[in-house]
Amino acid sequence: MEKQYFENQIFEKTDFAENGIAKGNYEDCQFLQCNFINADISGIHFLNCKFQVCNLSLCHIEKTAFKNAAFKDCKLVGLRFDLCDPFLFEVVFDNCVMNLISFFKVKLKKTIFTGCKIHDTDFAAADLTGAVFNHCDLAGSSFENTILEKADFRKAYNYSFDPAINKIKKAMFSRAGLTGLLNQFDIIIE
């Protein structure tokens, strides 16, 4: 089956969960209020695409390419970004619900997360060098052997990780957030 090419198209209120999505390359496309729940978007290339108010929960994204993809007001639950095509992988998340996601070993250098609820997400062995977590709730998310150098957690909250098993050189934290770095010591801070 030949892959199709879509450029500068707007897909609005489309139910890809019910109808499927054409395999191919999508460049400079917008997806507005679309339903992708449990859809198979494996192997599709999204270049400079915007997803707004979409539900991509439980999507199958094996070998999917997200190159300069932006997600705004989206629901992304149970996604395996670790299975995506890593070549030129670049994403931005704004005001998204991002629970139970795997970013295991994903390169997320300078990725910006703004106003996101990122619960129970796996960042183990990911490269978050220079990433920004601006007003993000990271409750239950795990960081182990993660590169967090120059990452900005100053406006993040509910995070907890062990500085001894992560690379945090020049990472930025607020005073209020320092407790998230001390939780493993089971101490009381007043």
Image (cartoon, rainbow, N blue to C red):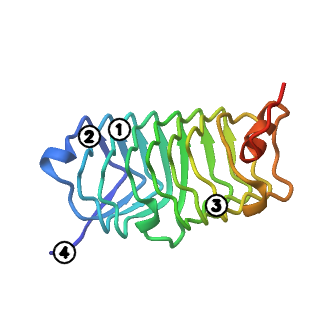
Q: Earlier in the sequence, mark 2 or mark 1?
A: 2
Badge 4 local density, few (<14 within 10 Å), some, or many (20+)?
few
Q: Left or right of 173: which side holds 107?
A: left
Give the quarter of the figure containing the N terminus.
Answer: bottom left
Residue 54, label in figure:
1
| Residue type beneath disc 2 | Asn
Evaluate if marks 3 and 2 touch, with contact meaning CB atoms under 8 Å apart: no
* C-alpha span from label 4 to label 2: 24 Å
Cα separation, mark 4 vs mark 1, equals 27 Å
Amino acid on which the number 3 mark rests in the picture: Glu
For label 1, count other residues whose C-alpha is less than 10 Å away and answer few (under 14), some (14-19) or many (20+).
many
x, y percent for residue 138: 59, 40
x, y percent for residue 166 = 73, 61
Of label 4 and label 1, which has the lower sequence position? 4
The residue identified by callout 2 is 35
Circle 4: element type: loop
Report the mark closest to the observer, 3 or 1. Answer: 3
SS for tag 2? loop
- Closer to the chain start, of discs 3 and 2, is 2
Mark 1 and mark 2 in contact (Cβ < 8 Å)?
Answer: yes
Quickly name the residue at label 3.
144
Secondary structure under tag 3 reads loop
Q: Secondary structure at mark 1?
A: loop
Q: Residue at x 73, y 57 (%)?
A: 148
What residue is pinned by disc 4?
Answer: 2
